[in-house]
Amino acid sequence: MIRTTLLASALTALSVPAFADPFTLFIHETPADVALRSDTTGAGAAYWALWAEYAAMIGQTGMVRGGAPLVVSEGDGNRVSGYFILEAPSLEEAEALAALAPAATRGGRVIVAPHYPMPEMSN
């Protein structure tokens, strides 16, 4: 309930952008959280519920353009466990949304990367 209230407060503070820049939020979860993906107990259900709540909250901003959890294999060096693509009015607003992600609040981290425009390519 407290997390829902915090998310709602953050959502109210953010505005749907008229003009926005693209950013990718690279999700880096702890190994323990990655293991919860396949946990069939209440702990696994609670893990997925946190991500569903977060995805719904940032979806309500109108900024999300895509995203997905990624396969994380031991030993392959891939520590990125998922991503969201946003169009936000500023880096600060993208970072504010990233700070609310379950990974950022559970010992992992979220890296916000602005997109670099490529000549002769459109979004």
Image (tube, rainbow, N blue to C red):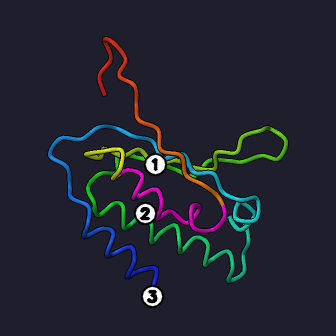
Circle 1 residue? 84
Residue at mark 3 to residue at mark 2: CA–CA distance: 16 Å
Of residue 85 and residue 10, the one placed in the foreground of this image is: 10
Residue 41 is situated, as x and y percent measured from the top left of the image, at: 72, 81
Q: Secondary structure at mark 2?
A: helix
**Badge 2 vs badge 1, beta-carbon distance below 8 Å:** yes
- Residue found farthest to the front: 92
Location of residue 105 with respect to 18 vertically, above or below:
below
Circle 3 residue? 1
Q: Quadrant of the N terminus?
A: bottom left
Residue 5 is situated, as x and y percent measured from the top left of the image, at: 37, 82
Is 95 magenta? The answer is: yes
Residue drawn at x 39%, y 77% is 6
Q: Quadrant of the C terminus?
A: top left
Q: Secondary structure at mark 3?
A: loop
Q: Residues within 10 Å of mark 1 (few under 14, many from 20)?
A: many
Picture quadrant of residue 104:
bottom right
Picture quadrant of residue 115:
top left
- Residue found farthest to the bottom: 1
Location of residue 8 with respect to 32 vertically, above or below:
below
Residue 91 is situated, as x and y percent measured from the top left of the image, at: 36, 44
Of callouts 2 and 1, the N-terminal one: 2
Is 109 magenta? The answer is: no
